[in-house]
Image (cartoon, rainbow, N blue to C red):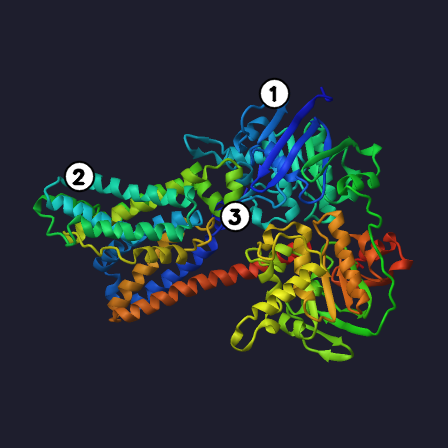
Amino acid sequence: MESPFKRFLAIRGMGQVITVTTGLIILSVVFGFMNPMFFSSRNVSNLLRQIAPILLIGIGQSYVLLIGQIDLSIGSVVGMSCMISATLMTRGVPPIVAVLITIACALTVGVVNGLLVAWCKLPSFIGTLGTMTIARGIAQIANNNFNTDSIGDGAEGFRNFFYYGRTAGLYNTIWIALVLWLIFNFVLTRTRTGRHIYAIGSNIEAARLSGVSVISTTVKAYLVSAFVCCVVGLITTATSGMGAMDAGSSYELYAVAASVIGGISTLGGQGLLFGTVIGASIWGVLQNGLQFAGAPIAIRNIVIGVIVVVSVLLDVIVRSNKGKGFKMFKRQS
Amino acid sequence: MSNEYVVEMKNITKSFPGVKALDDVSFHLKSGQVMALLGENGAGKSTLMKILSGIYSRDAGTIRVFGNDIKGNITPKIAQELGVAIIHQELNMCSHLTVAENIFLGKEIHSKGLLKDREMLKRAHSVLDRLKIDIQPTSVVGDLAVGQQQMVEIAKALESNAKVLIMDEPTSALTSKEIEELFRIIREIKADGCGIVYISHRLEELQHIVDAVTIMRDGRYINEGVFKELTLKQIISDMVGREIKEQFPRVDTVRGNKIFSVRNLNAGRMVRDVSFEAYEGEILGIAGLMGSGRTETTRAVFGVDPKESGEIYLQGEKIEIHCPMDAIRHGLVLAPEDRKKDGLCTKLSVRENIALANLDELCEKGGIVNRKKEREIVNTAISNLKIKLPSAEVNAASLSGGNQQKVVVAKWLARNSKVVIFDEPTRGIDVAAKVEIYNIMNTLKQNGIAVIFVSSEMPEVLGIADRIVVMCDGRVTGSLKAKETTQEEILSYATMFEKKID
């Protein structure tokens, strides 16, 4: 039998993950040299807390990308969740109830997304563009077109749970991201649903003909996406202590970036959720490190844009070289 | 029990909007039998089998499987429970997943949603072993050869206890070695008592594998019988509905000047030191086994793939071809092998497809398409090639294989080309359409155009070409006169591999 290590390397998509992990390490070392404070425990735990929301939405987008679709409503669902939870809490609803209501609203968007794409057969780009606009509209309507006031002292526990508190030395936000990642990674790699997600992304027709329910699996993927967005929305509320209507704007694209840097194929069927961790980390490290280095936001944006393109380009080059032999073979046969 | 019917379909009718695809069709299959389902493209073979496997629902008719009447519609799930499995023409596998994952797709072994990978691997192993297929269940399907992928599909069907296996054109993408392997497996599962429906256009391979035939034409049942009691001629006339006088119509012309020659062309491993020449008014056949480098040669000549070295002469002058545009400008055109992938824009109309290759001539200043000129070119092409279509505005994808192929040809014939390369123009099209394609080549030949005809079907190369260049493993191994050679001779050149060990 092969050694476990070899088997680990042989996992499909591991190559890209290893490449970007190396990139992440190099980046961190470079930033560490530029400013020793980068590795201070204070900055590290702040950095991890910055990464957590990106990782969460990355998980959601990865699920959807793996079935070969896209979720453009991510940022709006974050904003919607932020506004709904904050509005409820400012009106005196107990935080726990507010959280449950918010989750229910977000999951509704997930179901709608899934049905639009799988049942109505809308291109996901269009379907989720619609829900993106609608969810943003709901975010605005939640408090009559105003950001909310402070969610108040009664929500202290809520704010600690999602943002300020620490457990075993780490911020709770980090724990939330970690636990959710473990759960969703398990679902993806070890369960039937996970297998079906890869199968649909790889060849939807083959999956359908093999008896895989494309509709329910697609809905599940969008539900995961909506759920993590909701969590990020709650984290946003806890962070600022109020609801902001424009919370989470452009997050859907950050989520694509985290997934794609980590090796999730935008065409579906390929990639590991482990890669998304690395992708999100590179994102966070760049933001944090460049900030430390004193780079203005404009420069940060440019650098990150370049990194996204280059990392995907590298993957394309590697794959097309591999593909050449395969393509030639196909011609002959 | 072996004489019991495992499948009986009676009076099956199915309409699609505007067409009656099946009209009162019957079909029978016994266990341990390989039944060939024959007919031209559009005869309704695939539709009938899609009804049996639950992809389409029937409008009327009765279906009995293992003696049980099937009431109501069959869904893919019900078909699976009945033991009916279909191996599709376009292989339907998840190329990113492993062999074992594909075999168990949709019927994963699990407890409460948790996958039992180890058990699935073990069972995948055992089914592959049973068929004596040498593939690791952990391999990723996308990395396998087409032939191997097909084996995996068969294994997948057997793992779900399929007793009726439908194979739609299983050999169209296989090499001859893979075909032998496929036939071995078919015999194996036949011995296990499975009934097999075998859909194929390649009549010559039937004798190796088929027990009985059912013939369909225009959505109707025509005939059924034991294969050995029928002659190929009878089968063809039943399929076509008329006698085809000449399977390979040959036109004799006087050979003209040497117009085109390729010297010492090298392009990768599959094109090594290839030289050949073509004359006006002559059809040059390029024969060889699958993977002998014929397609690669045409692609390198046409400028699709880069050339390493070599010279190309047109009418005695050396020409440089770096990209397809160069070739087209010199009057050299290629009708590629894979219609859907390389030959047509399937989402565009027939008009747009034909115009696409001629836009340089159709466009006026500023790149505006001259609609009137476009219509003229398109209509001339359609009537010259006798393309059957309701209007030039229909999608190219909606045409039958033979008509699609004619559109690919029509694209190029609208311009005044000097050399026309056809790469496997008759693949996957029916007998009658093949003859029409041959006639098109003959017309070109009569008009003094040099035609280069690449094909892996030896009888047609022998029947149509005037001169034959044989390739093997990327090299030209022989050059023969069609009238003076035999299939055996071509084959001996086609298998002239370099000695790997001295």
| Quarter residue A308 falls in | bottom left
> Residue B374, relative to residue A323: is it above or below?
below
Q: Which residue is mark 3?
A: B96
Is disc 2 placed on a helix, strand or loop?
helix
Which residue: 80% across, 53% down?
B460
Q: Label for residue A24?
A: none
x, y percent for residue A186: 38, 41
Residue type indicated by callout 3 = His
Verify CB contact (< 8 Å) between mark 2 and mark 1: no
x, y percent for residue B474: 74, 62
Q: Is residue A68 visible?
A: yes
Chain ID for label 1?
B
Q: Is residue A182 visible?
A: no
Q: CA distance from mark 2 to mark 3?
A: 42 Å
Viewer-side label of 3, 1: 1
Q: CA distance from mark 2 to mark 1?
A: 57 Å
Farthest right residue in view:
B484
Is disc 1 placed on a helix, strand or loop?
strand
Residue type indicated by callout 1 = Asn
Of the pair A249 and B281, the residue shown nearer to us: B281
> Residue A30, relative to residue A140: is it above or below?
below
Q: Which residue is mark 1?
A: B68
Farthest left residue in view:
A153
Question: Is the residue marked by circle 2 packed among few (<14), some (14-19), or many (20+) residues within 10 Å?
Answer: some
Q: Which residue is mark 2?
A: A96
N-term mark: 3 or 1: 1
Is disc 3 placed on a helix, strand or loop?
loop
x, y percent for residue B281: 82, 68
Which residue: 67% across, 65% down?
B412
Farthest front residue in view:
B372
